Amino acid sequence: MATTANTQTLEEIQNFKGKYPKQLWYLFLSEMWERFSFYGMRGMLTIFMVDKAQLAMTDHDANLQYGATQAFVYTLAFVGGLFADKVLGFRKSIFWGGFLMILGSFILAISPKEFFYVGISFTIVGTGFFKPNISTMVGDLYAKGDERRDAGFGLFYSGINIGALAGGALCVWLGKHYSWNAAFSCAGIVMTISLLIFIFTKRTLGPIGLSPLGGKFTSSKIKMYDIMVYIGSLLAIPLILLLVSNSRYTDLFMYTVGPLTLLYIIYEMLKYNKIERQKITAAMVFIIFSIFFWAFFEQSGGSLNLFAANNLTDKVVGIPMDPNVINNSSNSAFVILFSPFIGLLWLWLAKRKLEPNTVVKFGLGFLFLSLAFYVFYYTRFFANKNGITSLNVFTLAYLIITIGELCLSPIGMSIVTKLSPKPMHGVMMGMWFLASAYGQYAAGLLGADMSSSNPNASLSEKLILYTDGYKHLAIYALVAGVVLIVISPLVRKLMHEVH
Ligand code: GLN
């Protein structure tokens, strides 16, 4: 099998029979373990930060620090996508990123308190090289116009969430009940599994993900460029460390990087004709709206995680359950459960010519998001006098938020690869994740804004502050959804029949 797979051309790969190409399953598995590690870490961050024996931060600071950390993770995805397009190709980027993520997790495992920022910085740079590029490779398994692409991203999205479910539950549980060293080691071990799967299956990818410089330069020159990227990314680690550990620098970085990348995209766009440019513009509309989506959605790793730690009962439908485990994993469980149904629903509607277009689906995503935050707000009416409220209602809000996510996130990744020309695939996927970076950054600010910086605030006070904040988010999300639906005819024009 190895030799035939080795010689497969792009056309042979893209002309696969059935619903999914077999390479998708390999990427699925590798991404599943990577997300296990990533969401394991994400789920631990705020809890670790506020732990009195660890970083002993206030809720306010932990929210900000969480937002900054996540913002850098996703900002680096833009850089990772860019270097993959221009120098390394997707495969070497994934290898390098995975390697740095493993190093970061084990550095944290040695002494999380002492090496927190060092370990996190390695992980941030590593994820930047890994995450966007594995997603872009999924898109490259499909020929232009292949209707099966959305389903492919849907399946890939389930893989993401199987990993996120297991990691979000296991790592935070290990950290809270056993030791943070064990929890970070767990993240490192599963990341090693992810990378090994990728290394052993990458030969089946034919030419997908090879260096874009192949054929243009001699192999020794290519090696030199590769090494320059590796060294550059290692040198970036102390810089990231400085930026991420100092919120003032984080702000400055976020204010400059966005406008610069936009200018860069405009510069790249100029190389293409009018139709291509309009399609890229449409992709940018999706990308910009997604910032708002993630800013609200990502309360999940920040303020909602702290809300869960303090203000919730520990039973869901009568079953004893750690509320942080619910917070970190119920979303993923609902994605796994509902994503096939949502896929079928779109197909069913398509047969009746009723399927909403991608812009309207995005709008619906916001409407569900709005409803979910209304339910988070509504938890306050179920609270006892100590400010402890219902984990059931909280879980219901996660169910609703997940439906919103499924209307937007997998479709977003897919549409970005459909609307952009091939040489820009990496960078546009990077832009998609850069939007998440801004979302995460804003999520931290919003979370900090609604949390009390008074370490002695009572649980009832915290409940009121957080739920007030959630009500505001519900209103903003509603407005964004309505705007998207109203402008949908315009955006569709820019998309030129791509849907
Ligand atoms: N849950 C998805 C993932 O981990 C989307 C994350 C994002 O874009 N913010 O891939």
Image (tube, rainbow, N blue to C red):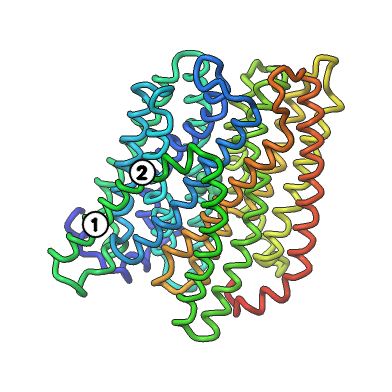
Q: Is the residue 117 above or below the residue 402 in the image?
A: above
- Vertical arrangement, residue 354 with respect to residue 304, above or below: below
Q: Label 1's element? A: helix
Query: Tag 1 or tag 2, which sits nearer the N-term?
Result: 1
Give residue 190's position: percent from left, percent from top.
36, 32
Snapshot quadrant of residue 322: top right
**Residue type beneath disc 1:** Met
Looking at the image, how many numbered discs can be counted on the residues? 2
The answer to whether one can see residue 161 in this image is no
Residue depicted at x 62% and y 55%: 291
| Point 35% across, 36% down: residue | 191
Q: x, y percentage for residue 354? A: 73, 66
Image point (52%, 30%), residue name: 45
For disc 2, the marked residue is: 237
Left or right, 33 with respect to 314, comes to left
Please state, as top left, top right, bottom left or bottom right, where the C terminus lies in the image.
bottom right
Q: Is residue 319 at least partly visible in the picture?
A: yes
Name the residue nearer the viewer: 402 or 342.
Answer: 402
Identify the residue shown where x is 48% and y is 52%. Answer: 75
Disc marking residue 155: none
On the image, the x and y values in percent for residue 281 come to 58, 73
Q: Which residue reaches farthest bottom?
A: 273
Image side of residue 281 versus residue 210, left or right: right
- Residue hosting label 1: 228
